[in-house]
Structure formats: structure tokens, C-alpha cells
Amino acid sequence: MEDCIIVGAGPAGLTAAIYLARFHLSIRLFDSGNSRAALIPCTHNHAGYPEGISGRELLARMLEQAERYGAQRELARVTKVERADDGFLVRTDQREYRSRTVLLATGVINNRPKDIDDALHTEALAEGLLRYCPICDGYEVTDKRVAVIGTGRHGAAETLFLRGYTAHLTLISPEAEHSFEPKMEAELERADVTRVAGPCGGYAIEDGQLALDTAEGRLRFDSVYPALGSRVRSDLASEAGAMISDDDCVVVDSHQRTNVPGLFAAGDVVKGLDQISHAMGEGGVAATAIRNYLAELEPLRR
């Protein structure tokens, strides 16, 4: 019986693991190996790293810190979380675990452009030719030639956000013709954003740029942002009885508590700003709330 099982080893889950281990609690951390933070080639937004740090290195440092204080990591994918008389049952493909509390830090998955193979996707990310977070790295595309793959309100909003960094913007529809509300169309016009119809595909790195085919021919860009939405990994929470919002996020209170006693959630799986610093803050809040919850069940004493 663990004091807490954490599902997800991204910034939220690892921060919580550090806190909980330092509370002298028994912690088991499940890592499926696909944290979105690991895709970041170099973040310059994280305070304390003026030269930047890669997502993988940051996660490795955080894991080392958590394990130093006794947190245990399991390289496994959790398939089910369910209530039990004395807490929770957490199942993987291999076995079953028991815990008094559970923290879900399962995050989200970005929707990738169609027909881009894994090897090219990885290389383009590493070279900054493909990017997913304008808040994180818009600064790095200052005055560069940039494309956004998307349409409608979401694609237009991301493009207009990037207009604060560069005037050389092209919005490419992922499938066919663009579809905008008149007000959004007018804003794009005022911002002098080029709109190109789709479909798009045929991705390749050519002469240090990311090239792709469109309805208006083959185009090349210094960076491309897919604005294709994401999938929130809230299935485990929903199956465990937690409330889920209309946009598929786990509903929590100010202490990261779900409506299920003993079940907590933090990070991108909860509605909010999808940023490393924000996820880490929620992880710290959740860990403290978990410690206090356990203390109410039974005094925590050395």
C-alpha cells in the first residue's frame, strides 16, 4: 500500500513526487515515457536557466531529485484507476498496485500534421523547424518566415498571437479552403497575414527550412506551428468517477482535488495555462493537499 501513486512523469508529476518524498511518504511514480515536455528541444522560459534547457534534461534532473528522496519510478502505462475500500487500485498491463491516494498528471497530446513520419517530426522539432507552443518559443522566431497549419478560430488566434513576433506569417489550411468568421477574417487582413488553402503535406527539410506542399505550390518556412488542437488524457480520471469539463479537462478545486476523495489532478490535464512553470506550481499544491489529506486519515509521525 503506497501513500500516493502518481500517474505521469512530466513537470507536474515530478514536482509532486519531490514534495511528497520529502514529506517522508511512500511514492510510486508511473512513467509511460511520452511526456510532452520531452519534445521541447530547448526552453528559455524556465526561470533559472538563462542559456535554456532541453525538456529531456529538465525531466531527468527532476527525476533524479525525486529518487534521491525515495520516490520510486515504474516505466509502465497505467490502464485503470478505481476506488477500493482503503484507497485505490491502480492497474498496468503487468500488475496491480494499491494506494491511499492518486495524483493524475497525465497531460495532453498535441495533434500532429497528417503524413509527417516520426523520424522527420523528431528532427524538425530538434532543429526548431517545427514548434507547438508560441508562448514558449515565439521569441525564437522573431522576424523569421513562419507558417501556421490550421484554420477557423483556433488557427487564426494562434497566427495573430505570433504576429507579435514576426510580420512574415502564412496561415495554411490543413484540409481545403479556410473557414473564418467575418470578424476574424478582417483581423487577419489587418495583420497582413497570407492565407493559403490546403490540403498540405509532403513535408521535408530542404536547405535548412521545413518545406510542404499546398494548393498554391510548395512552400518553405523557417518554422511551422501546427494549430490543430490537442487531446486531453483524462480517460483515467473519468473512469475513476472524476468530473470532466466540456473541453475534456479534469475539474479540480483550488487544492487540485477532484470530486472523488483521495483523487487529485495537476498539470495540463487540468484546464489552465499549458506551461512548465504552471504545471510545477500545481504539482506542489497537489502534493501539499495530499499530505494534509493523509494526515486527516491518520496522523503522520516519525
Image (cartoon, helix red, strand yellow):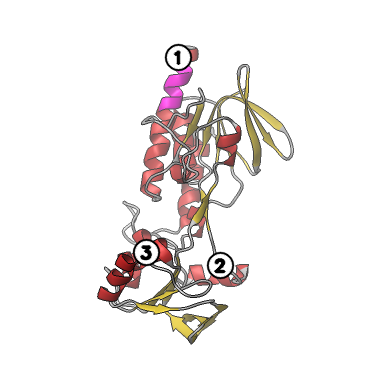
Comparing 246 with 169, the one in front is 246
The correct choice, above or below, for 40 with respect to 211 in the image is above
Relative to residue 219, is residue 285 drawn left or right?
Answer: left
Residue pointed to by mark 2 = 122
**What span is in magenta?**
289-296
Identify the mark at residue 282; answer none if there is no mark: none
Q: Is residue 207 in sight in this rendering? A: no
Please check the rendered image and state whether residue 278 is part of the magenta-colored stretch, yes or no: no
**Mark 1 closeness class: few <14, some 14–19, many ≥20 residues within 10 Å:** few
| Sequence order check, earlier mark of 1 and 3 | 3
Which is closer to the viewer, label 1 or label 3?
Answer: 3
Q: Residue 146 location in percent, x, y?
A: 38, 75
Q: Residue 27 location in percent, x, y?
A: 55, 30
Which is closer to the viewer, label 3 or label 2?
Answer: 3
Q: CA distance from mark 2 to mark 1?
A: 46 Å
| Sequence order check, earlier mark of 3 and 2 | 2
The correct choice, above or below, for 170 with respect to 251 in the image is below
**Mark 3 in CB contact with mark 2 (< 8 angstroms):** no
Residue pointed to by mark 3 = 158
Residue drawn 31% across the image and 51% down it: 47
Identify the mark at residue 296; answer none if there is no mark: 1
Q: Is residue 37 in sight in this rendering? A: yes
Q: Quadrant of residue 26?
A: top right
